[in-house]
Image: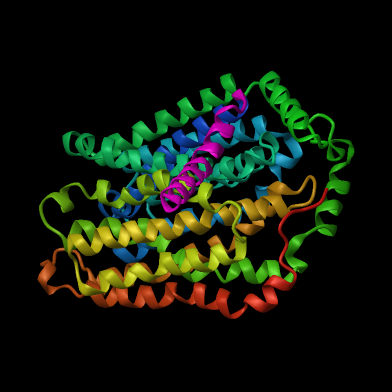
Amino acid sequence: MAQEIKEEGLIGKTVKEITQPFKDLFHTSRALFGLNLSYLIEGFTYFGVLGYLTLYFNEYVGLNDINAGQMVGVLTAGITLSMLFLGATVDWIGLRKSMIYALIFMFGGRVLISVAPHIGVPGWGNSAHIFAMLGILGIVIGYGIYQPACYAGVKKLTNEKTSAMGYAMLYALMNLGGFLPGIVAPEVRQATSMLTVMWIYAIFTIVGLGVVYFIITKKAYNKAVEEVKKDSNVQVEEEETDELSNMSFKEKVSFYIKNFPLRDLRFLFFIFILIPVQTLFAHNWLTLPAYFKRAFEGTVSNYFEFFTNFNPVLIFILTPMVTALTSKKDTYKMMIIGTLVMASPTFFLATGPSMPAVFAYLIVMSIGEAMWQPRFLQWVAEIAPKNMTGIYMGIGQFPWFLTKIITSLYSGWFLMHYCPDNTLPSMMNTGTMWLIYGFIAIISPIGLFLARGWMQKGFKTKHEA
């Protein structure tokens, strides 16, 4: 009897740990709702375009696998580099303006990508290639402003009780958006063309812009900030009154240089040791679309968008639940465990192309990602000093720049040698490709584990304003 009561108490406690953060978050503001809805729509448009880009450059711009992978690398790495320089935009001009300007740039970029094959000549360096790259430039500038702004917005619009779930939900909603192209795109593409789907993504960028303009109004934002201040009983800086607003441009630059985080060796190690495991993210768009289309036949090949975007829907489901259960756990230990869980299933694919291996890889990898990625983003935002959340988010994402550049340089070569186009799956050697990728990814948890003594001595957990 006592054992049954104990088990019921444990179950009840677990259920409460899972549900309470959701309850706290659902009582938040209109401004945070608008931010989350915008991020959901942007996840749909961004990952929808990204999932097509390698094939788009192959089929419509006339580039080979290596050059197509490099062009996708320009987009993904360019976004991260853009965050380094433009991440401070939200700190300087505020959340709402930053998101509006960012979405305008992204809309222009997506329109250019959609029209490039119609108005240009295909081939490396020809007009279609140039127009497509100008479109990528628009997305790079826009997203470099947009993502740091959104994470800075969560910091401003949540309190101590809701912040962990706020970051987790933002990350989860982006991934839900990333799953939706796998449902919407295949039928539209097969009935029309890939370019028609690209136009749909451009139109949805305007929908996202409308969400920011009409839901995250100045009044709604100020009301949300006041509510956070009231709930947490701490001084929360507002865009209209923070100290940066009274500085000249020269003084702002001096302030950022003086408080730049790159002098912290632990911070540098922590963000750079994640590069190996983050290569698996890059393979989601650099390798998986071509892998599913070439190494499989029938349903998997015809509906490769669905299988490519299966990871995001798992992240949407898993991230809030994992965060609710682990939000009080030590961040550094969660990083070690999470990166290990994420890297390990890559070796499943080394057995060759089979659906059991694919689903095992996607499910286990997603569990690992849900364990560490939102915690990392929350950690970067929370250790940022006052008025520097945007730039810290930009610098925290800088290893993404290297990851995307490095991965895009070799992914096309691996596809051409281990998973070539117009080749029977039985003649491919995809197992070797994934075995090598597994050895690369496992470096991150090993490095974090070996450095745990040094790292935890001075590991920051929250900035004291």
From the top left corner, tell me how far across and down residue 24 is, in percent. Answer: 59, 33
Residue at x 17%, y 72% (from the top left corner): 428
Q: Report the front residue among 102 and 116.
A: 102
Residue at x 69%, y 47% (from the top left corner): 390
From the top left corner, tell me how far across and down residue 248 is, in percent. Answer: 88, 41
- Rendered view: 164 above or below 23: below
Q: Per the image, is 112 magenta? A: no
In this picture, residue 116 sits left or right of residue 274: left
Q: In this rendering, does residue 29 appear at all?
A: yes
From the top left corner, tell me how far across and down residue 131 is, in percent. Answer: 42, 45
Q: Residue furthest bottom?
A: 450
Q: In this rendering, does residue 134 appear at all?
A: no
Q: Per the image, is 18 magenta? A: yes
- The range drawn in magenta is 1-30
- Rendered view: 4 above or below 279: above
Would you say the magenta stretch is mainly helix, strand or loop? helix
Residue at x 49%, y 29% (from the top left corner): 208
